[in-house]
Image (cartoon, helix red, strand yellow):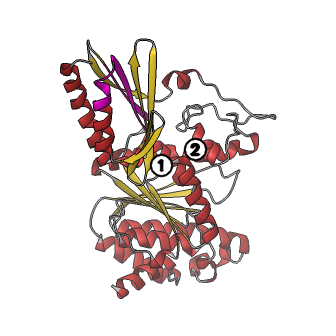
Amino acid sequence: MNSKNIGKLKLFMMGIESRFAENNDTFKEIVVTYKAGLKEFVGRGAYEEGKIKFNFSGVTKVKTIKEVVSSILEEAEKYEAVNFIYRERGTDILITADNKNVTMKNVKVKEEEKETKKIHFTEGTSTLLNRSYYIKVGEADEVLKAIDIMTKDGKVKNDKIRKYNQIDHYVELLDPMFEKLAQKGNLTILDCGCGKSYLSFVLNYYLTEVKKIKCNFIGIDIKESVIETSKAMAESLGYRNMEFYAMDIKEFKSRKKINVVLSLHACDTATDMALAYGIKEEAEAIVAVPCCHKELLSQYSYEPLKSILKYGVLKARMADVLTDGLRGTLLEAKGYDVSIVEYISPLETPKNLMIRAVKIKDEDYKAMDNYMSMMAALNVYPALYGFLNEWEYEE
């Protein structure tokens, strides 16, 4: 290839170097094809601990991105044309060069396949909703298979359709929030009581590959077995922007600024611990889907409603309302804009609320006084308030 176009190719490849250095967490592979007449010679490179394991002409070496680019440019001089593909999660960068021209373009992966792919089911009756999905079959197959929503041959499992709908609706509810947070740059998202981290894996896919938002995920859970499962899944998917720790959230100290705190179905006061951690870290957003509510049931009393609360089932339901209502009120007092919405249908589970809180201002002392008055009126001492006081005292 002539020296003029080798020079142009070098400029494009310098951009590839910068891209890898800035965000190699999303890098998947390099494929370079040299052409001489009808013959083609292919080289491939995969990620290995911050470098690239590159194979060409039967020889495999681990090199830095700079060394790989240098060797590709040197080899290109010997051939009539070269096609270079830099693959990262959700995008392929294609560079083609010959003696006439050098071009570069970004291509959304499997674009043609995505446009024509239809949803297929395993045997049985489908209950997929008539809606446009955020986590689309055909685009998100890799992660849907990893979390056991989809079979190996690309069919949505009928016994997982409800779970698929829930996961997709979760993303739908959070999408506007992340749209606003994207301007803050690289987001660090903490999943408290992450379990097997299914929702974090799906969110990771959506934010990284669909929305093109740079993000890192940290999963915390007290159970070592689920943490090991999450680590293995992240490795198999190539999601290097995820890390997991088996520990109590009280013991966790982040090296990075935490932008978003998530908590899904953390039992009873574990939800309060996650909310308190988010408030303490002044996270820009906190999202919780609470599970069982036990704490306030044995605490609260309210004389004007005594004749109603004598019925056990009504007192229990009121305890649920008070628990999440007080959580929302304290978040507002700490400067968050709060919404409490139905996450899924109450026909599926009575524990179906999502608390979304976005930081908009400093602490509101008037709102805090109102919260304290409600505590006194109800004769309660909520765990969220207790965790916040405990952490403030320790500091």
The C terminus is located in which quarter?
Answer: bottom left
Residue that appears at 72% across and 74% down: 311
Where is residue 284 drawn, in percent x and y?
34, 59
To which quarter of the image does residue 211 belong? top left
Where is residue 281 drawn, in percent x and y?
35, 70
Callout 2: 10 Å neighbours few (<14), some, many (20+)?
Answer: many
Q: Is residue 376 above or below residue 213?
A: below
Q: Earlier in the sequence, mark 1 or mark 2?
A: 2
Q: Are marks 1 and 2 in contact (CB under 8 Å)?
A: yes
Question: In the rendered structure, does residue 81 fall within the stretch colored magenta?
Answer: yes
Residue type beneath disc 1? Asn
Where is residue 155 drawn, in percent x and y?
70, 34
User: Is residue 173 in sight in this rendering?
Assistant: no
Looking at the image, residue 65 sits to the left or right of residue 116; the answer is left
Q: Give the range drawn in magenta.
A: 73-97
Q: Mark 1 points at which residue?
A: 204
Q: What element carries label 1?
A: helix
Residue that appears at 69% across and 37% down: 156
Residue that appears at 32% across and 29% down: 75
Q: In this view, does 293 lie above or below 40?
A: below
Q: Mark 2 points at which residue?
A: 143
The N terminus is located in which quarter?
Answer: top left
Residue type beneath disc 2? Val
- Taking the view exactly as shown, the residue that stands out farthest to the bottom is 393
Between 141 and 86, the one lying in front of the other is 86
Q: Is residue 159 above or below residue 324?
A: above
